[in-house]
Amino acid sequence: MYILASKSPRRQELLKLLIDDFIIEVSNVDESLIKDEPYNLSATLSKAKAEEIFKRHPEDIVIAADTIVIHKNKILGKPKDSDDAFKMLKELSGDEHDVITGFTILSKDKCITKSVLTKVHFNTLSDELIKAYVQTGSPFDKAGAYGIQDKEFPLIKKIEGSYYNVMGLPVEELKKCL
């Protein structure tokens, strides 16, 4: 049995592109206690989440992932409130940043941990556009305060790398590893 260690509806949707039958079990790992270099953190977090679930399900295959946004060597997590979301989007406006998703596949036979980087180039955003986007509520459960899949808002100019990675699960690389 496959277990996805994530409550993210986007990860669930993306994993369905690869696996028909899996269950969800959310990890209880306190992410604030895990430290690493910004470009290694998502892989470290995904491994911790997978290991925590695997202890309860040693006969199954656990898939865990974590996505972070890095702008000017600073990690942008999920916004705390509307003001925080506005500040993050304003910071990203007209600039580029990295989105890194680390994933771990853990079973009794193997442990694979990888990370995938996608470079995202933002359009220059007006304050009015940012405010309208924040009012949708979409930014609040996403690292960097945005979703690439929110097509009605012209946030992104272009990407270099995996679209699915920016959504939260690098489907192409995960498929190779499965």
Image (cartoon, rainbow, N blue to C red):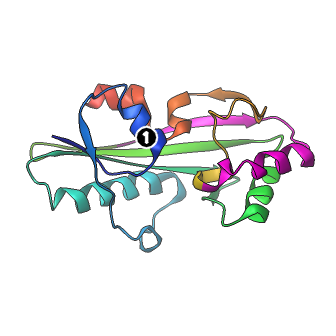
Residue 103, position as x, y percentages in the image: 37, 44
Residue 108, position as x, y percentages in the image: 9, 47
User: Is 55 positioned to the left or the right of 29 in the image?
Assistant: left
Front in this rendered view, residue 88 or 14: 14
Which residue is the site of mark 1? 11
- Crowd around label 1: few <14 · some 14–19 · many ≥20 (10 Å): many
Residue 121 position (above or below residue 92): above
- Residues drawn in magenta: 114-140
Image quarter of residue 85:
bottom right
Instruction: Decide whether residue 129 is among the magenta residues.
Output: yes
- Regarding mark 1 in the picture, which secondary structure is present there? helix
**Which residue is rendered at x = 60% and y = 50% of the image?**
69
User: Is 172 positioned to the left or the right of 113 in the image?
Assistant: right
Instruction: Decide whether residue 176 is among the magenta residues.
Output: no
Residue 134 position (above or below residue 12): below
Please state, as top left, top right, bottom left or bottom right, where the C terminus lies in the image. Answer: top left
